[in-house]
């Protein structure tokens, strides 16, 4: 069995690449990558986007804690060491498989629009949509945070360790300091101008006017104090009292003030929702339904692919990427038309088998579809007319996958939306989200309402796709990623790579990205994906070579063996024993 230190070394991106080069420096052929073997274990596994966070969760699992306990510890540390991606000021979606009952359920910890929010929240005086970053930076974009209550609710349902002890590692790191990672330093430098807008944010990320540097020791005593209050009092210490007052004051006193109130915080609640599951090659792919578009869109893509023998084609065949690309475009067309918070907007039957069979038949040609539009899925009631939404969703976010010693599985995607969220740092030592900019900035198009428009109390549509794949009622994959609306493509590709192309979980995670949402095929720069550009162009696709920084963290389960994969594009690791 590998030691924890060995696991950390073997799964850091730099070491993984060096190991792959040492094993077979010229062996890679086609798209399938040569990478270090996945981390394997027989008892438990955790994989997350930062080694310090993963180790905090690992220690909880070593001590006999559940996957829900470990998640609390991981999230508490992530909010400190990876503040640009997630934290107490954000929201999350969680998918849970219960080994004792065999049931799968989900918790919705998505942020909500304040009750004073109006449909024209992000419009100018002339009724035109604001510029994206004009809307993001400041208090206007801040929704009511849900992550702390989701942590508490998961622990209440499935935890067995002491709640207060789950914050110990994060408190110690916040008090004593941690070394700033290369990724955090680079992102601070790249966003320095926006981080400088709010004085408290600038003081933390730009001390003495200069961006944080790699290796610099960063302390956050304010965050430690917030965690101590959470540990002692639960989330009452967050949604009321001094911490809540600090959140509201930060939002309302910003250069661009928002409308969040103490009443919004007091009224927040986590919602349990049924898992949305789609069949795929003898498995059930289960994830988060609305207000997430993740499970529905991933499910539609896979359902359309099931009518084509993509396993026989393999990852190097341009034809397989034609099918995946156009299936994705068709699914995204439905996403833009129909998907939103189902507590506010009725939804058609987007996973109806006959409907998706008809959509799959659109892929039967040889070239890219010249045009793609939303379909006409069946309804359980009178059909409603919605206009297409073009809201912008930029990548940030983080993902956690955990399997505990009892076989419980947890997949959680967690976010403050854009990198560094609203760029507002609270007195409690954490950043606030800009989640409201996931709503459509327009309310109507040509007089037809847009489903994902802003409404008081509504949860903005998300692409977060925490997923658990089941075979014969038991999990075989726990998967998810950050990446904005490209999350859906990252998750679908990883499922296909593992289940259809037989890649081990680390190969599937490291497989170069090819993502097509709206017509242009994004090809991951510096990878073999670029080599498919000519063939895809000949099929009629527009292509764009660009960086595609996912953060896939995946666990596969094969009998008694757990295998963990961490995305080499970020700083994550897998740890198991």
Image (cartoon, rainbow, N blue to C red):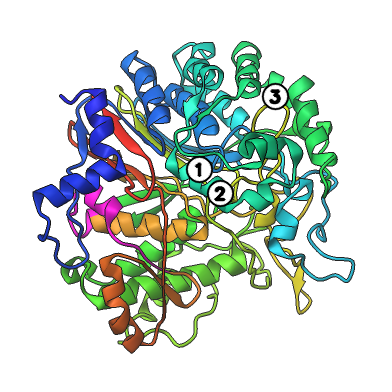
Pinpoint residue 137: horizontal percent, then vertical percent: 72, 51
Q: Rounded to the nearest whole Å, what is the CA distance between mark 3 and mark 1?
A: 28 Å
Q: Secondary structure at mark 2?
A: helix
Location of residue 104 by image quarter: top left
Q: Rounded to the nearest whole Å, what is the CA distance between mark 3 and mark 2?
A: 30 Å
Is 462 in front, or is 37?
37
Residue at the right extreme, as displayed = 125
Image quadrant in which the N terminus is located: top left
Q: Is residue 403 above or below residue 343?
A: above
Residue topped by disc 3: 238
Q: Earlier in the sequence, mark 3 or mark 2?
A: 2
Q: Secondary structure at mark 3?
A: helix
Q: Is residue 431 visible?
A: no
Q: How many marks?
A: 3
Mark 3 vs mark 1, foreground winner is 1
Q: Is residue 344 left or right of residue 147?
A: right
Q: Is residue 301 above or below residue 46?
A: below
Mark 2, Cα crowd under 10 Å, few <14 / some 14-19 / many 20+, is: some
Pinpoint residue 118: horizontal percent, then vertical percent: 83, 55
Who's the residue at 75% across and 39% down the image? 199
Location of residue 204 by image quarter: top right
Who's the residue at 46% across and 38% down the image? 214
Mark 3 vs mark 2, foreground winner is 2
């Amino acid at each position: 069995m590998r030691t924890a230190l060995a696991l950390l070394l073997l799964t850091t991106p730099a070491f993984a690449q060096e190991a792959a080069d040492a094993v077979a420096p010229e062996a890679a052929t086609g798209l399938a990558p040569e990478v270090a073997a996945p981390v394997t274990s027989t008892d438990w596994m955790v994989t997350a986007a930062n080694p310090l966070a993963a180790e905090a969760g690992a220690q909880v699992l070593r001590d006999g804690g559940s996957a829900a306990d470990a998640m609390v510890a991981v999230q508490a540390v992530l909010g400190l060491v990876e503040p640009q991606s997630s934290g107490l000021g954000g929201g999350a979606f969680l998918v849970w498989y219960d080994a004792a009952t065999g049931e799968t359920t989900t918790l919705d910890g998505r942020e909500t629009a304040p009750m004073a929010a109006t449909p024209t929240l992000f419009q100018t005086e002339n009724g035109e949509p604001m510029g994206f970053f004009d809307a993001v930076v400041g208090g206007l974009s801040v929704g009511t945070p849900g992550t702390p209550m989701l942590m508490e609710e998961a622990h209440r349902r499935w935890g067995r360790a002491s709640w207060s002890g789950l914050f110990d590692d994060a408190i110690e790191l916040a008090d004593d300091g941690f070394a700033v990672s290369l990724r955090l330093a680079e992102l601070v430098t790249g966003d320095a101008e926006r981080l400088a807008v709010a004085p408290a944010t600038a003081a933390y990320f730009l001390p003495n006017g200069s961006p944080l540097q790699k290796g610099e020791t960063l302390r956050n005593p304010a965050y430690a104090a917030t965690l101590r209050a959470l540990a002692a009092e639960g989330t009452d210490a967050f949604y009321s009292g001094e911490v809540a007052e600090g959140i509201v004051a930060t939002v309302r006193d910003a250069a661009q003030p928002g409308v969040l109130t103490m009443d919004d915080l007091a009224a927040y609640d986590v919602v349990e929702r049924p898992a949305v599951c789609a069949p795929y090659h003898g498995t059930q792919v289960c994830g988060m339904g609305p207000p997430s578009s993740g499970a529905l869109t991933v499910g539609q893509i896979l359902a359309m692919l099931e009518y084509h023998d993509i396993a026989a084609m393999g990852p190097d065949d341009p034809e397989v990427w034609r099918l995946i690309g156009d299936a994705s475009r068709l699914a995204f067309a439905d996403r833009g038309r129909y998907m939103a918070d189902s507590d506010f907007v009725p939804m058609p039957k987007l996973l109806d088998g006959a409907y998706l069979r008809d959509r799959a038949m659109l892929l039967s040609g040889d070239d890219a579809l010249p045009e793609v539009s939303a379909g006409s899925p069946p309804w359980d009631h009178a059909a409603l007319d919605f206009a297409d939404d073009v809201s912008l969703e930029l990548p940030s976010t983080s993902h956690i996958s955990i399997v505990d010693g009892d076989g419980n599985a947890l997949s959680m995607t967690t976010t403050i939306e854009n990198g560094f969220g609203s760029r507002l740092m609270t007195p409690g030592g954490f950043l606030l989200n800009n989640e409201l900019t996931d709503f459509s900035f327009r309310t109507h198009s040509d007089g037809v309402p847009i489903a994902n428009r802003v409404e008081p109390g509504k949860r903005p549509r998300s692409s977060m796709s925490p997923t658990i794949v089941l075979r014969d009622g038991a999990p075989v994959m726990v998967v998810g990623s950050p990446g904005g609306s490209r999350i859906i493509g990252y998750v679908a590709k990883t499922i296909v790579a593992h289940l259809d192309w037989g890649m081990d979980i680390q190969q599937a995670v490291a497989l170069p990205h090819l993502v097509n949402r709206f017509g242009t095929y994004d090809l991951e720069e510096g990878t073999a994906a670029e080599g498919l550009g000519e063939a895809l162009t000949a099929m009629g696709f527009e292509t764009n070579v660009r960086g595609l920084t996912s953060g896939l963290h995946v666990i596969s389960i094969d009998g008694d063996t757990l295998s963990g994969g961490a995305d080499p594009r970020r700083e994550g690791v897998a740890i198991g024993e």
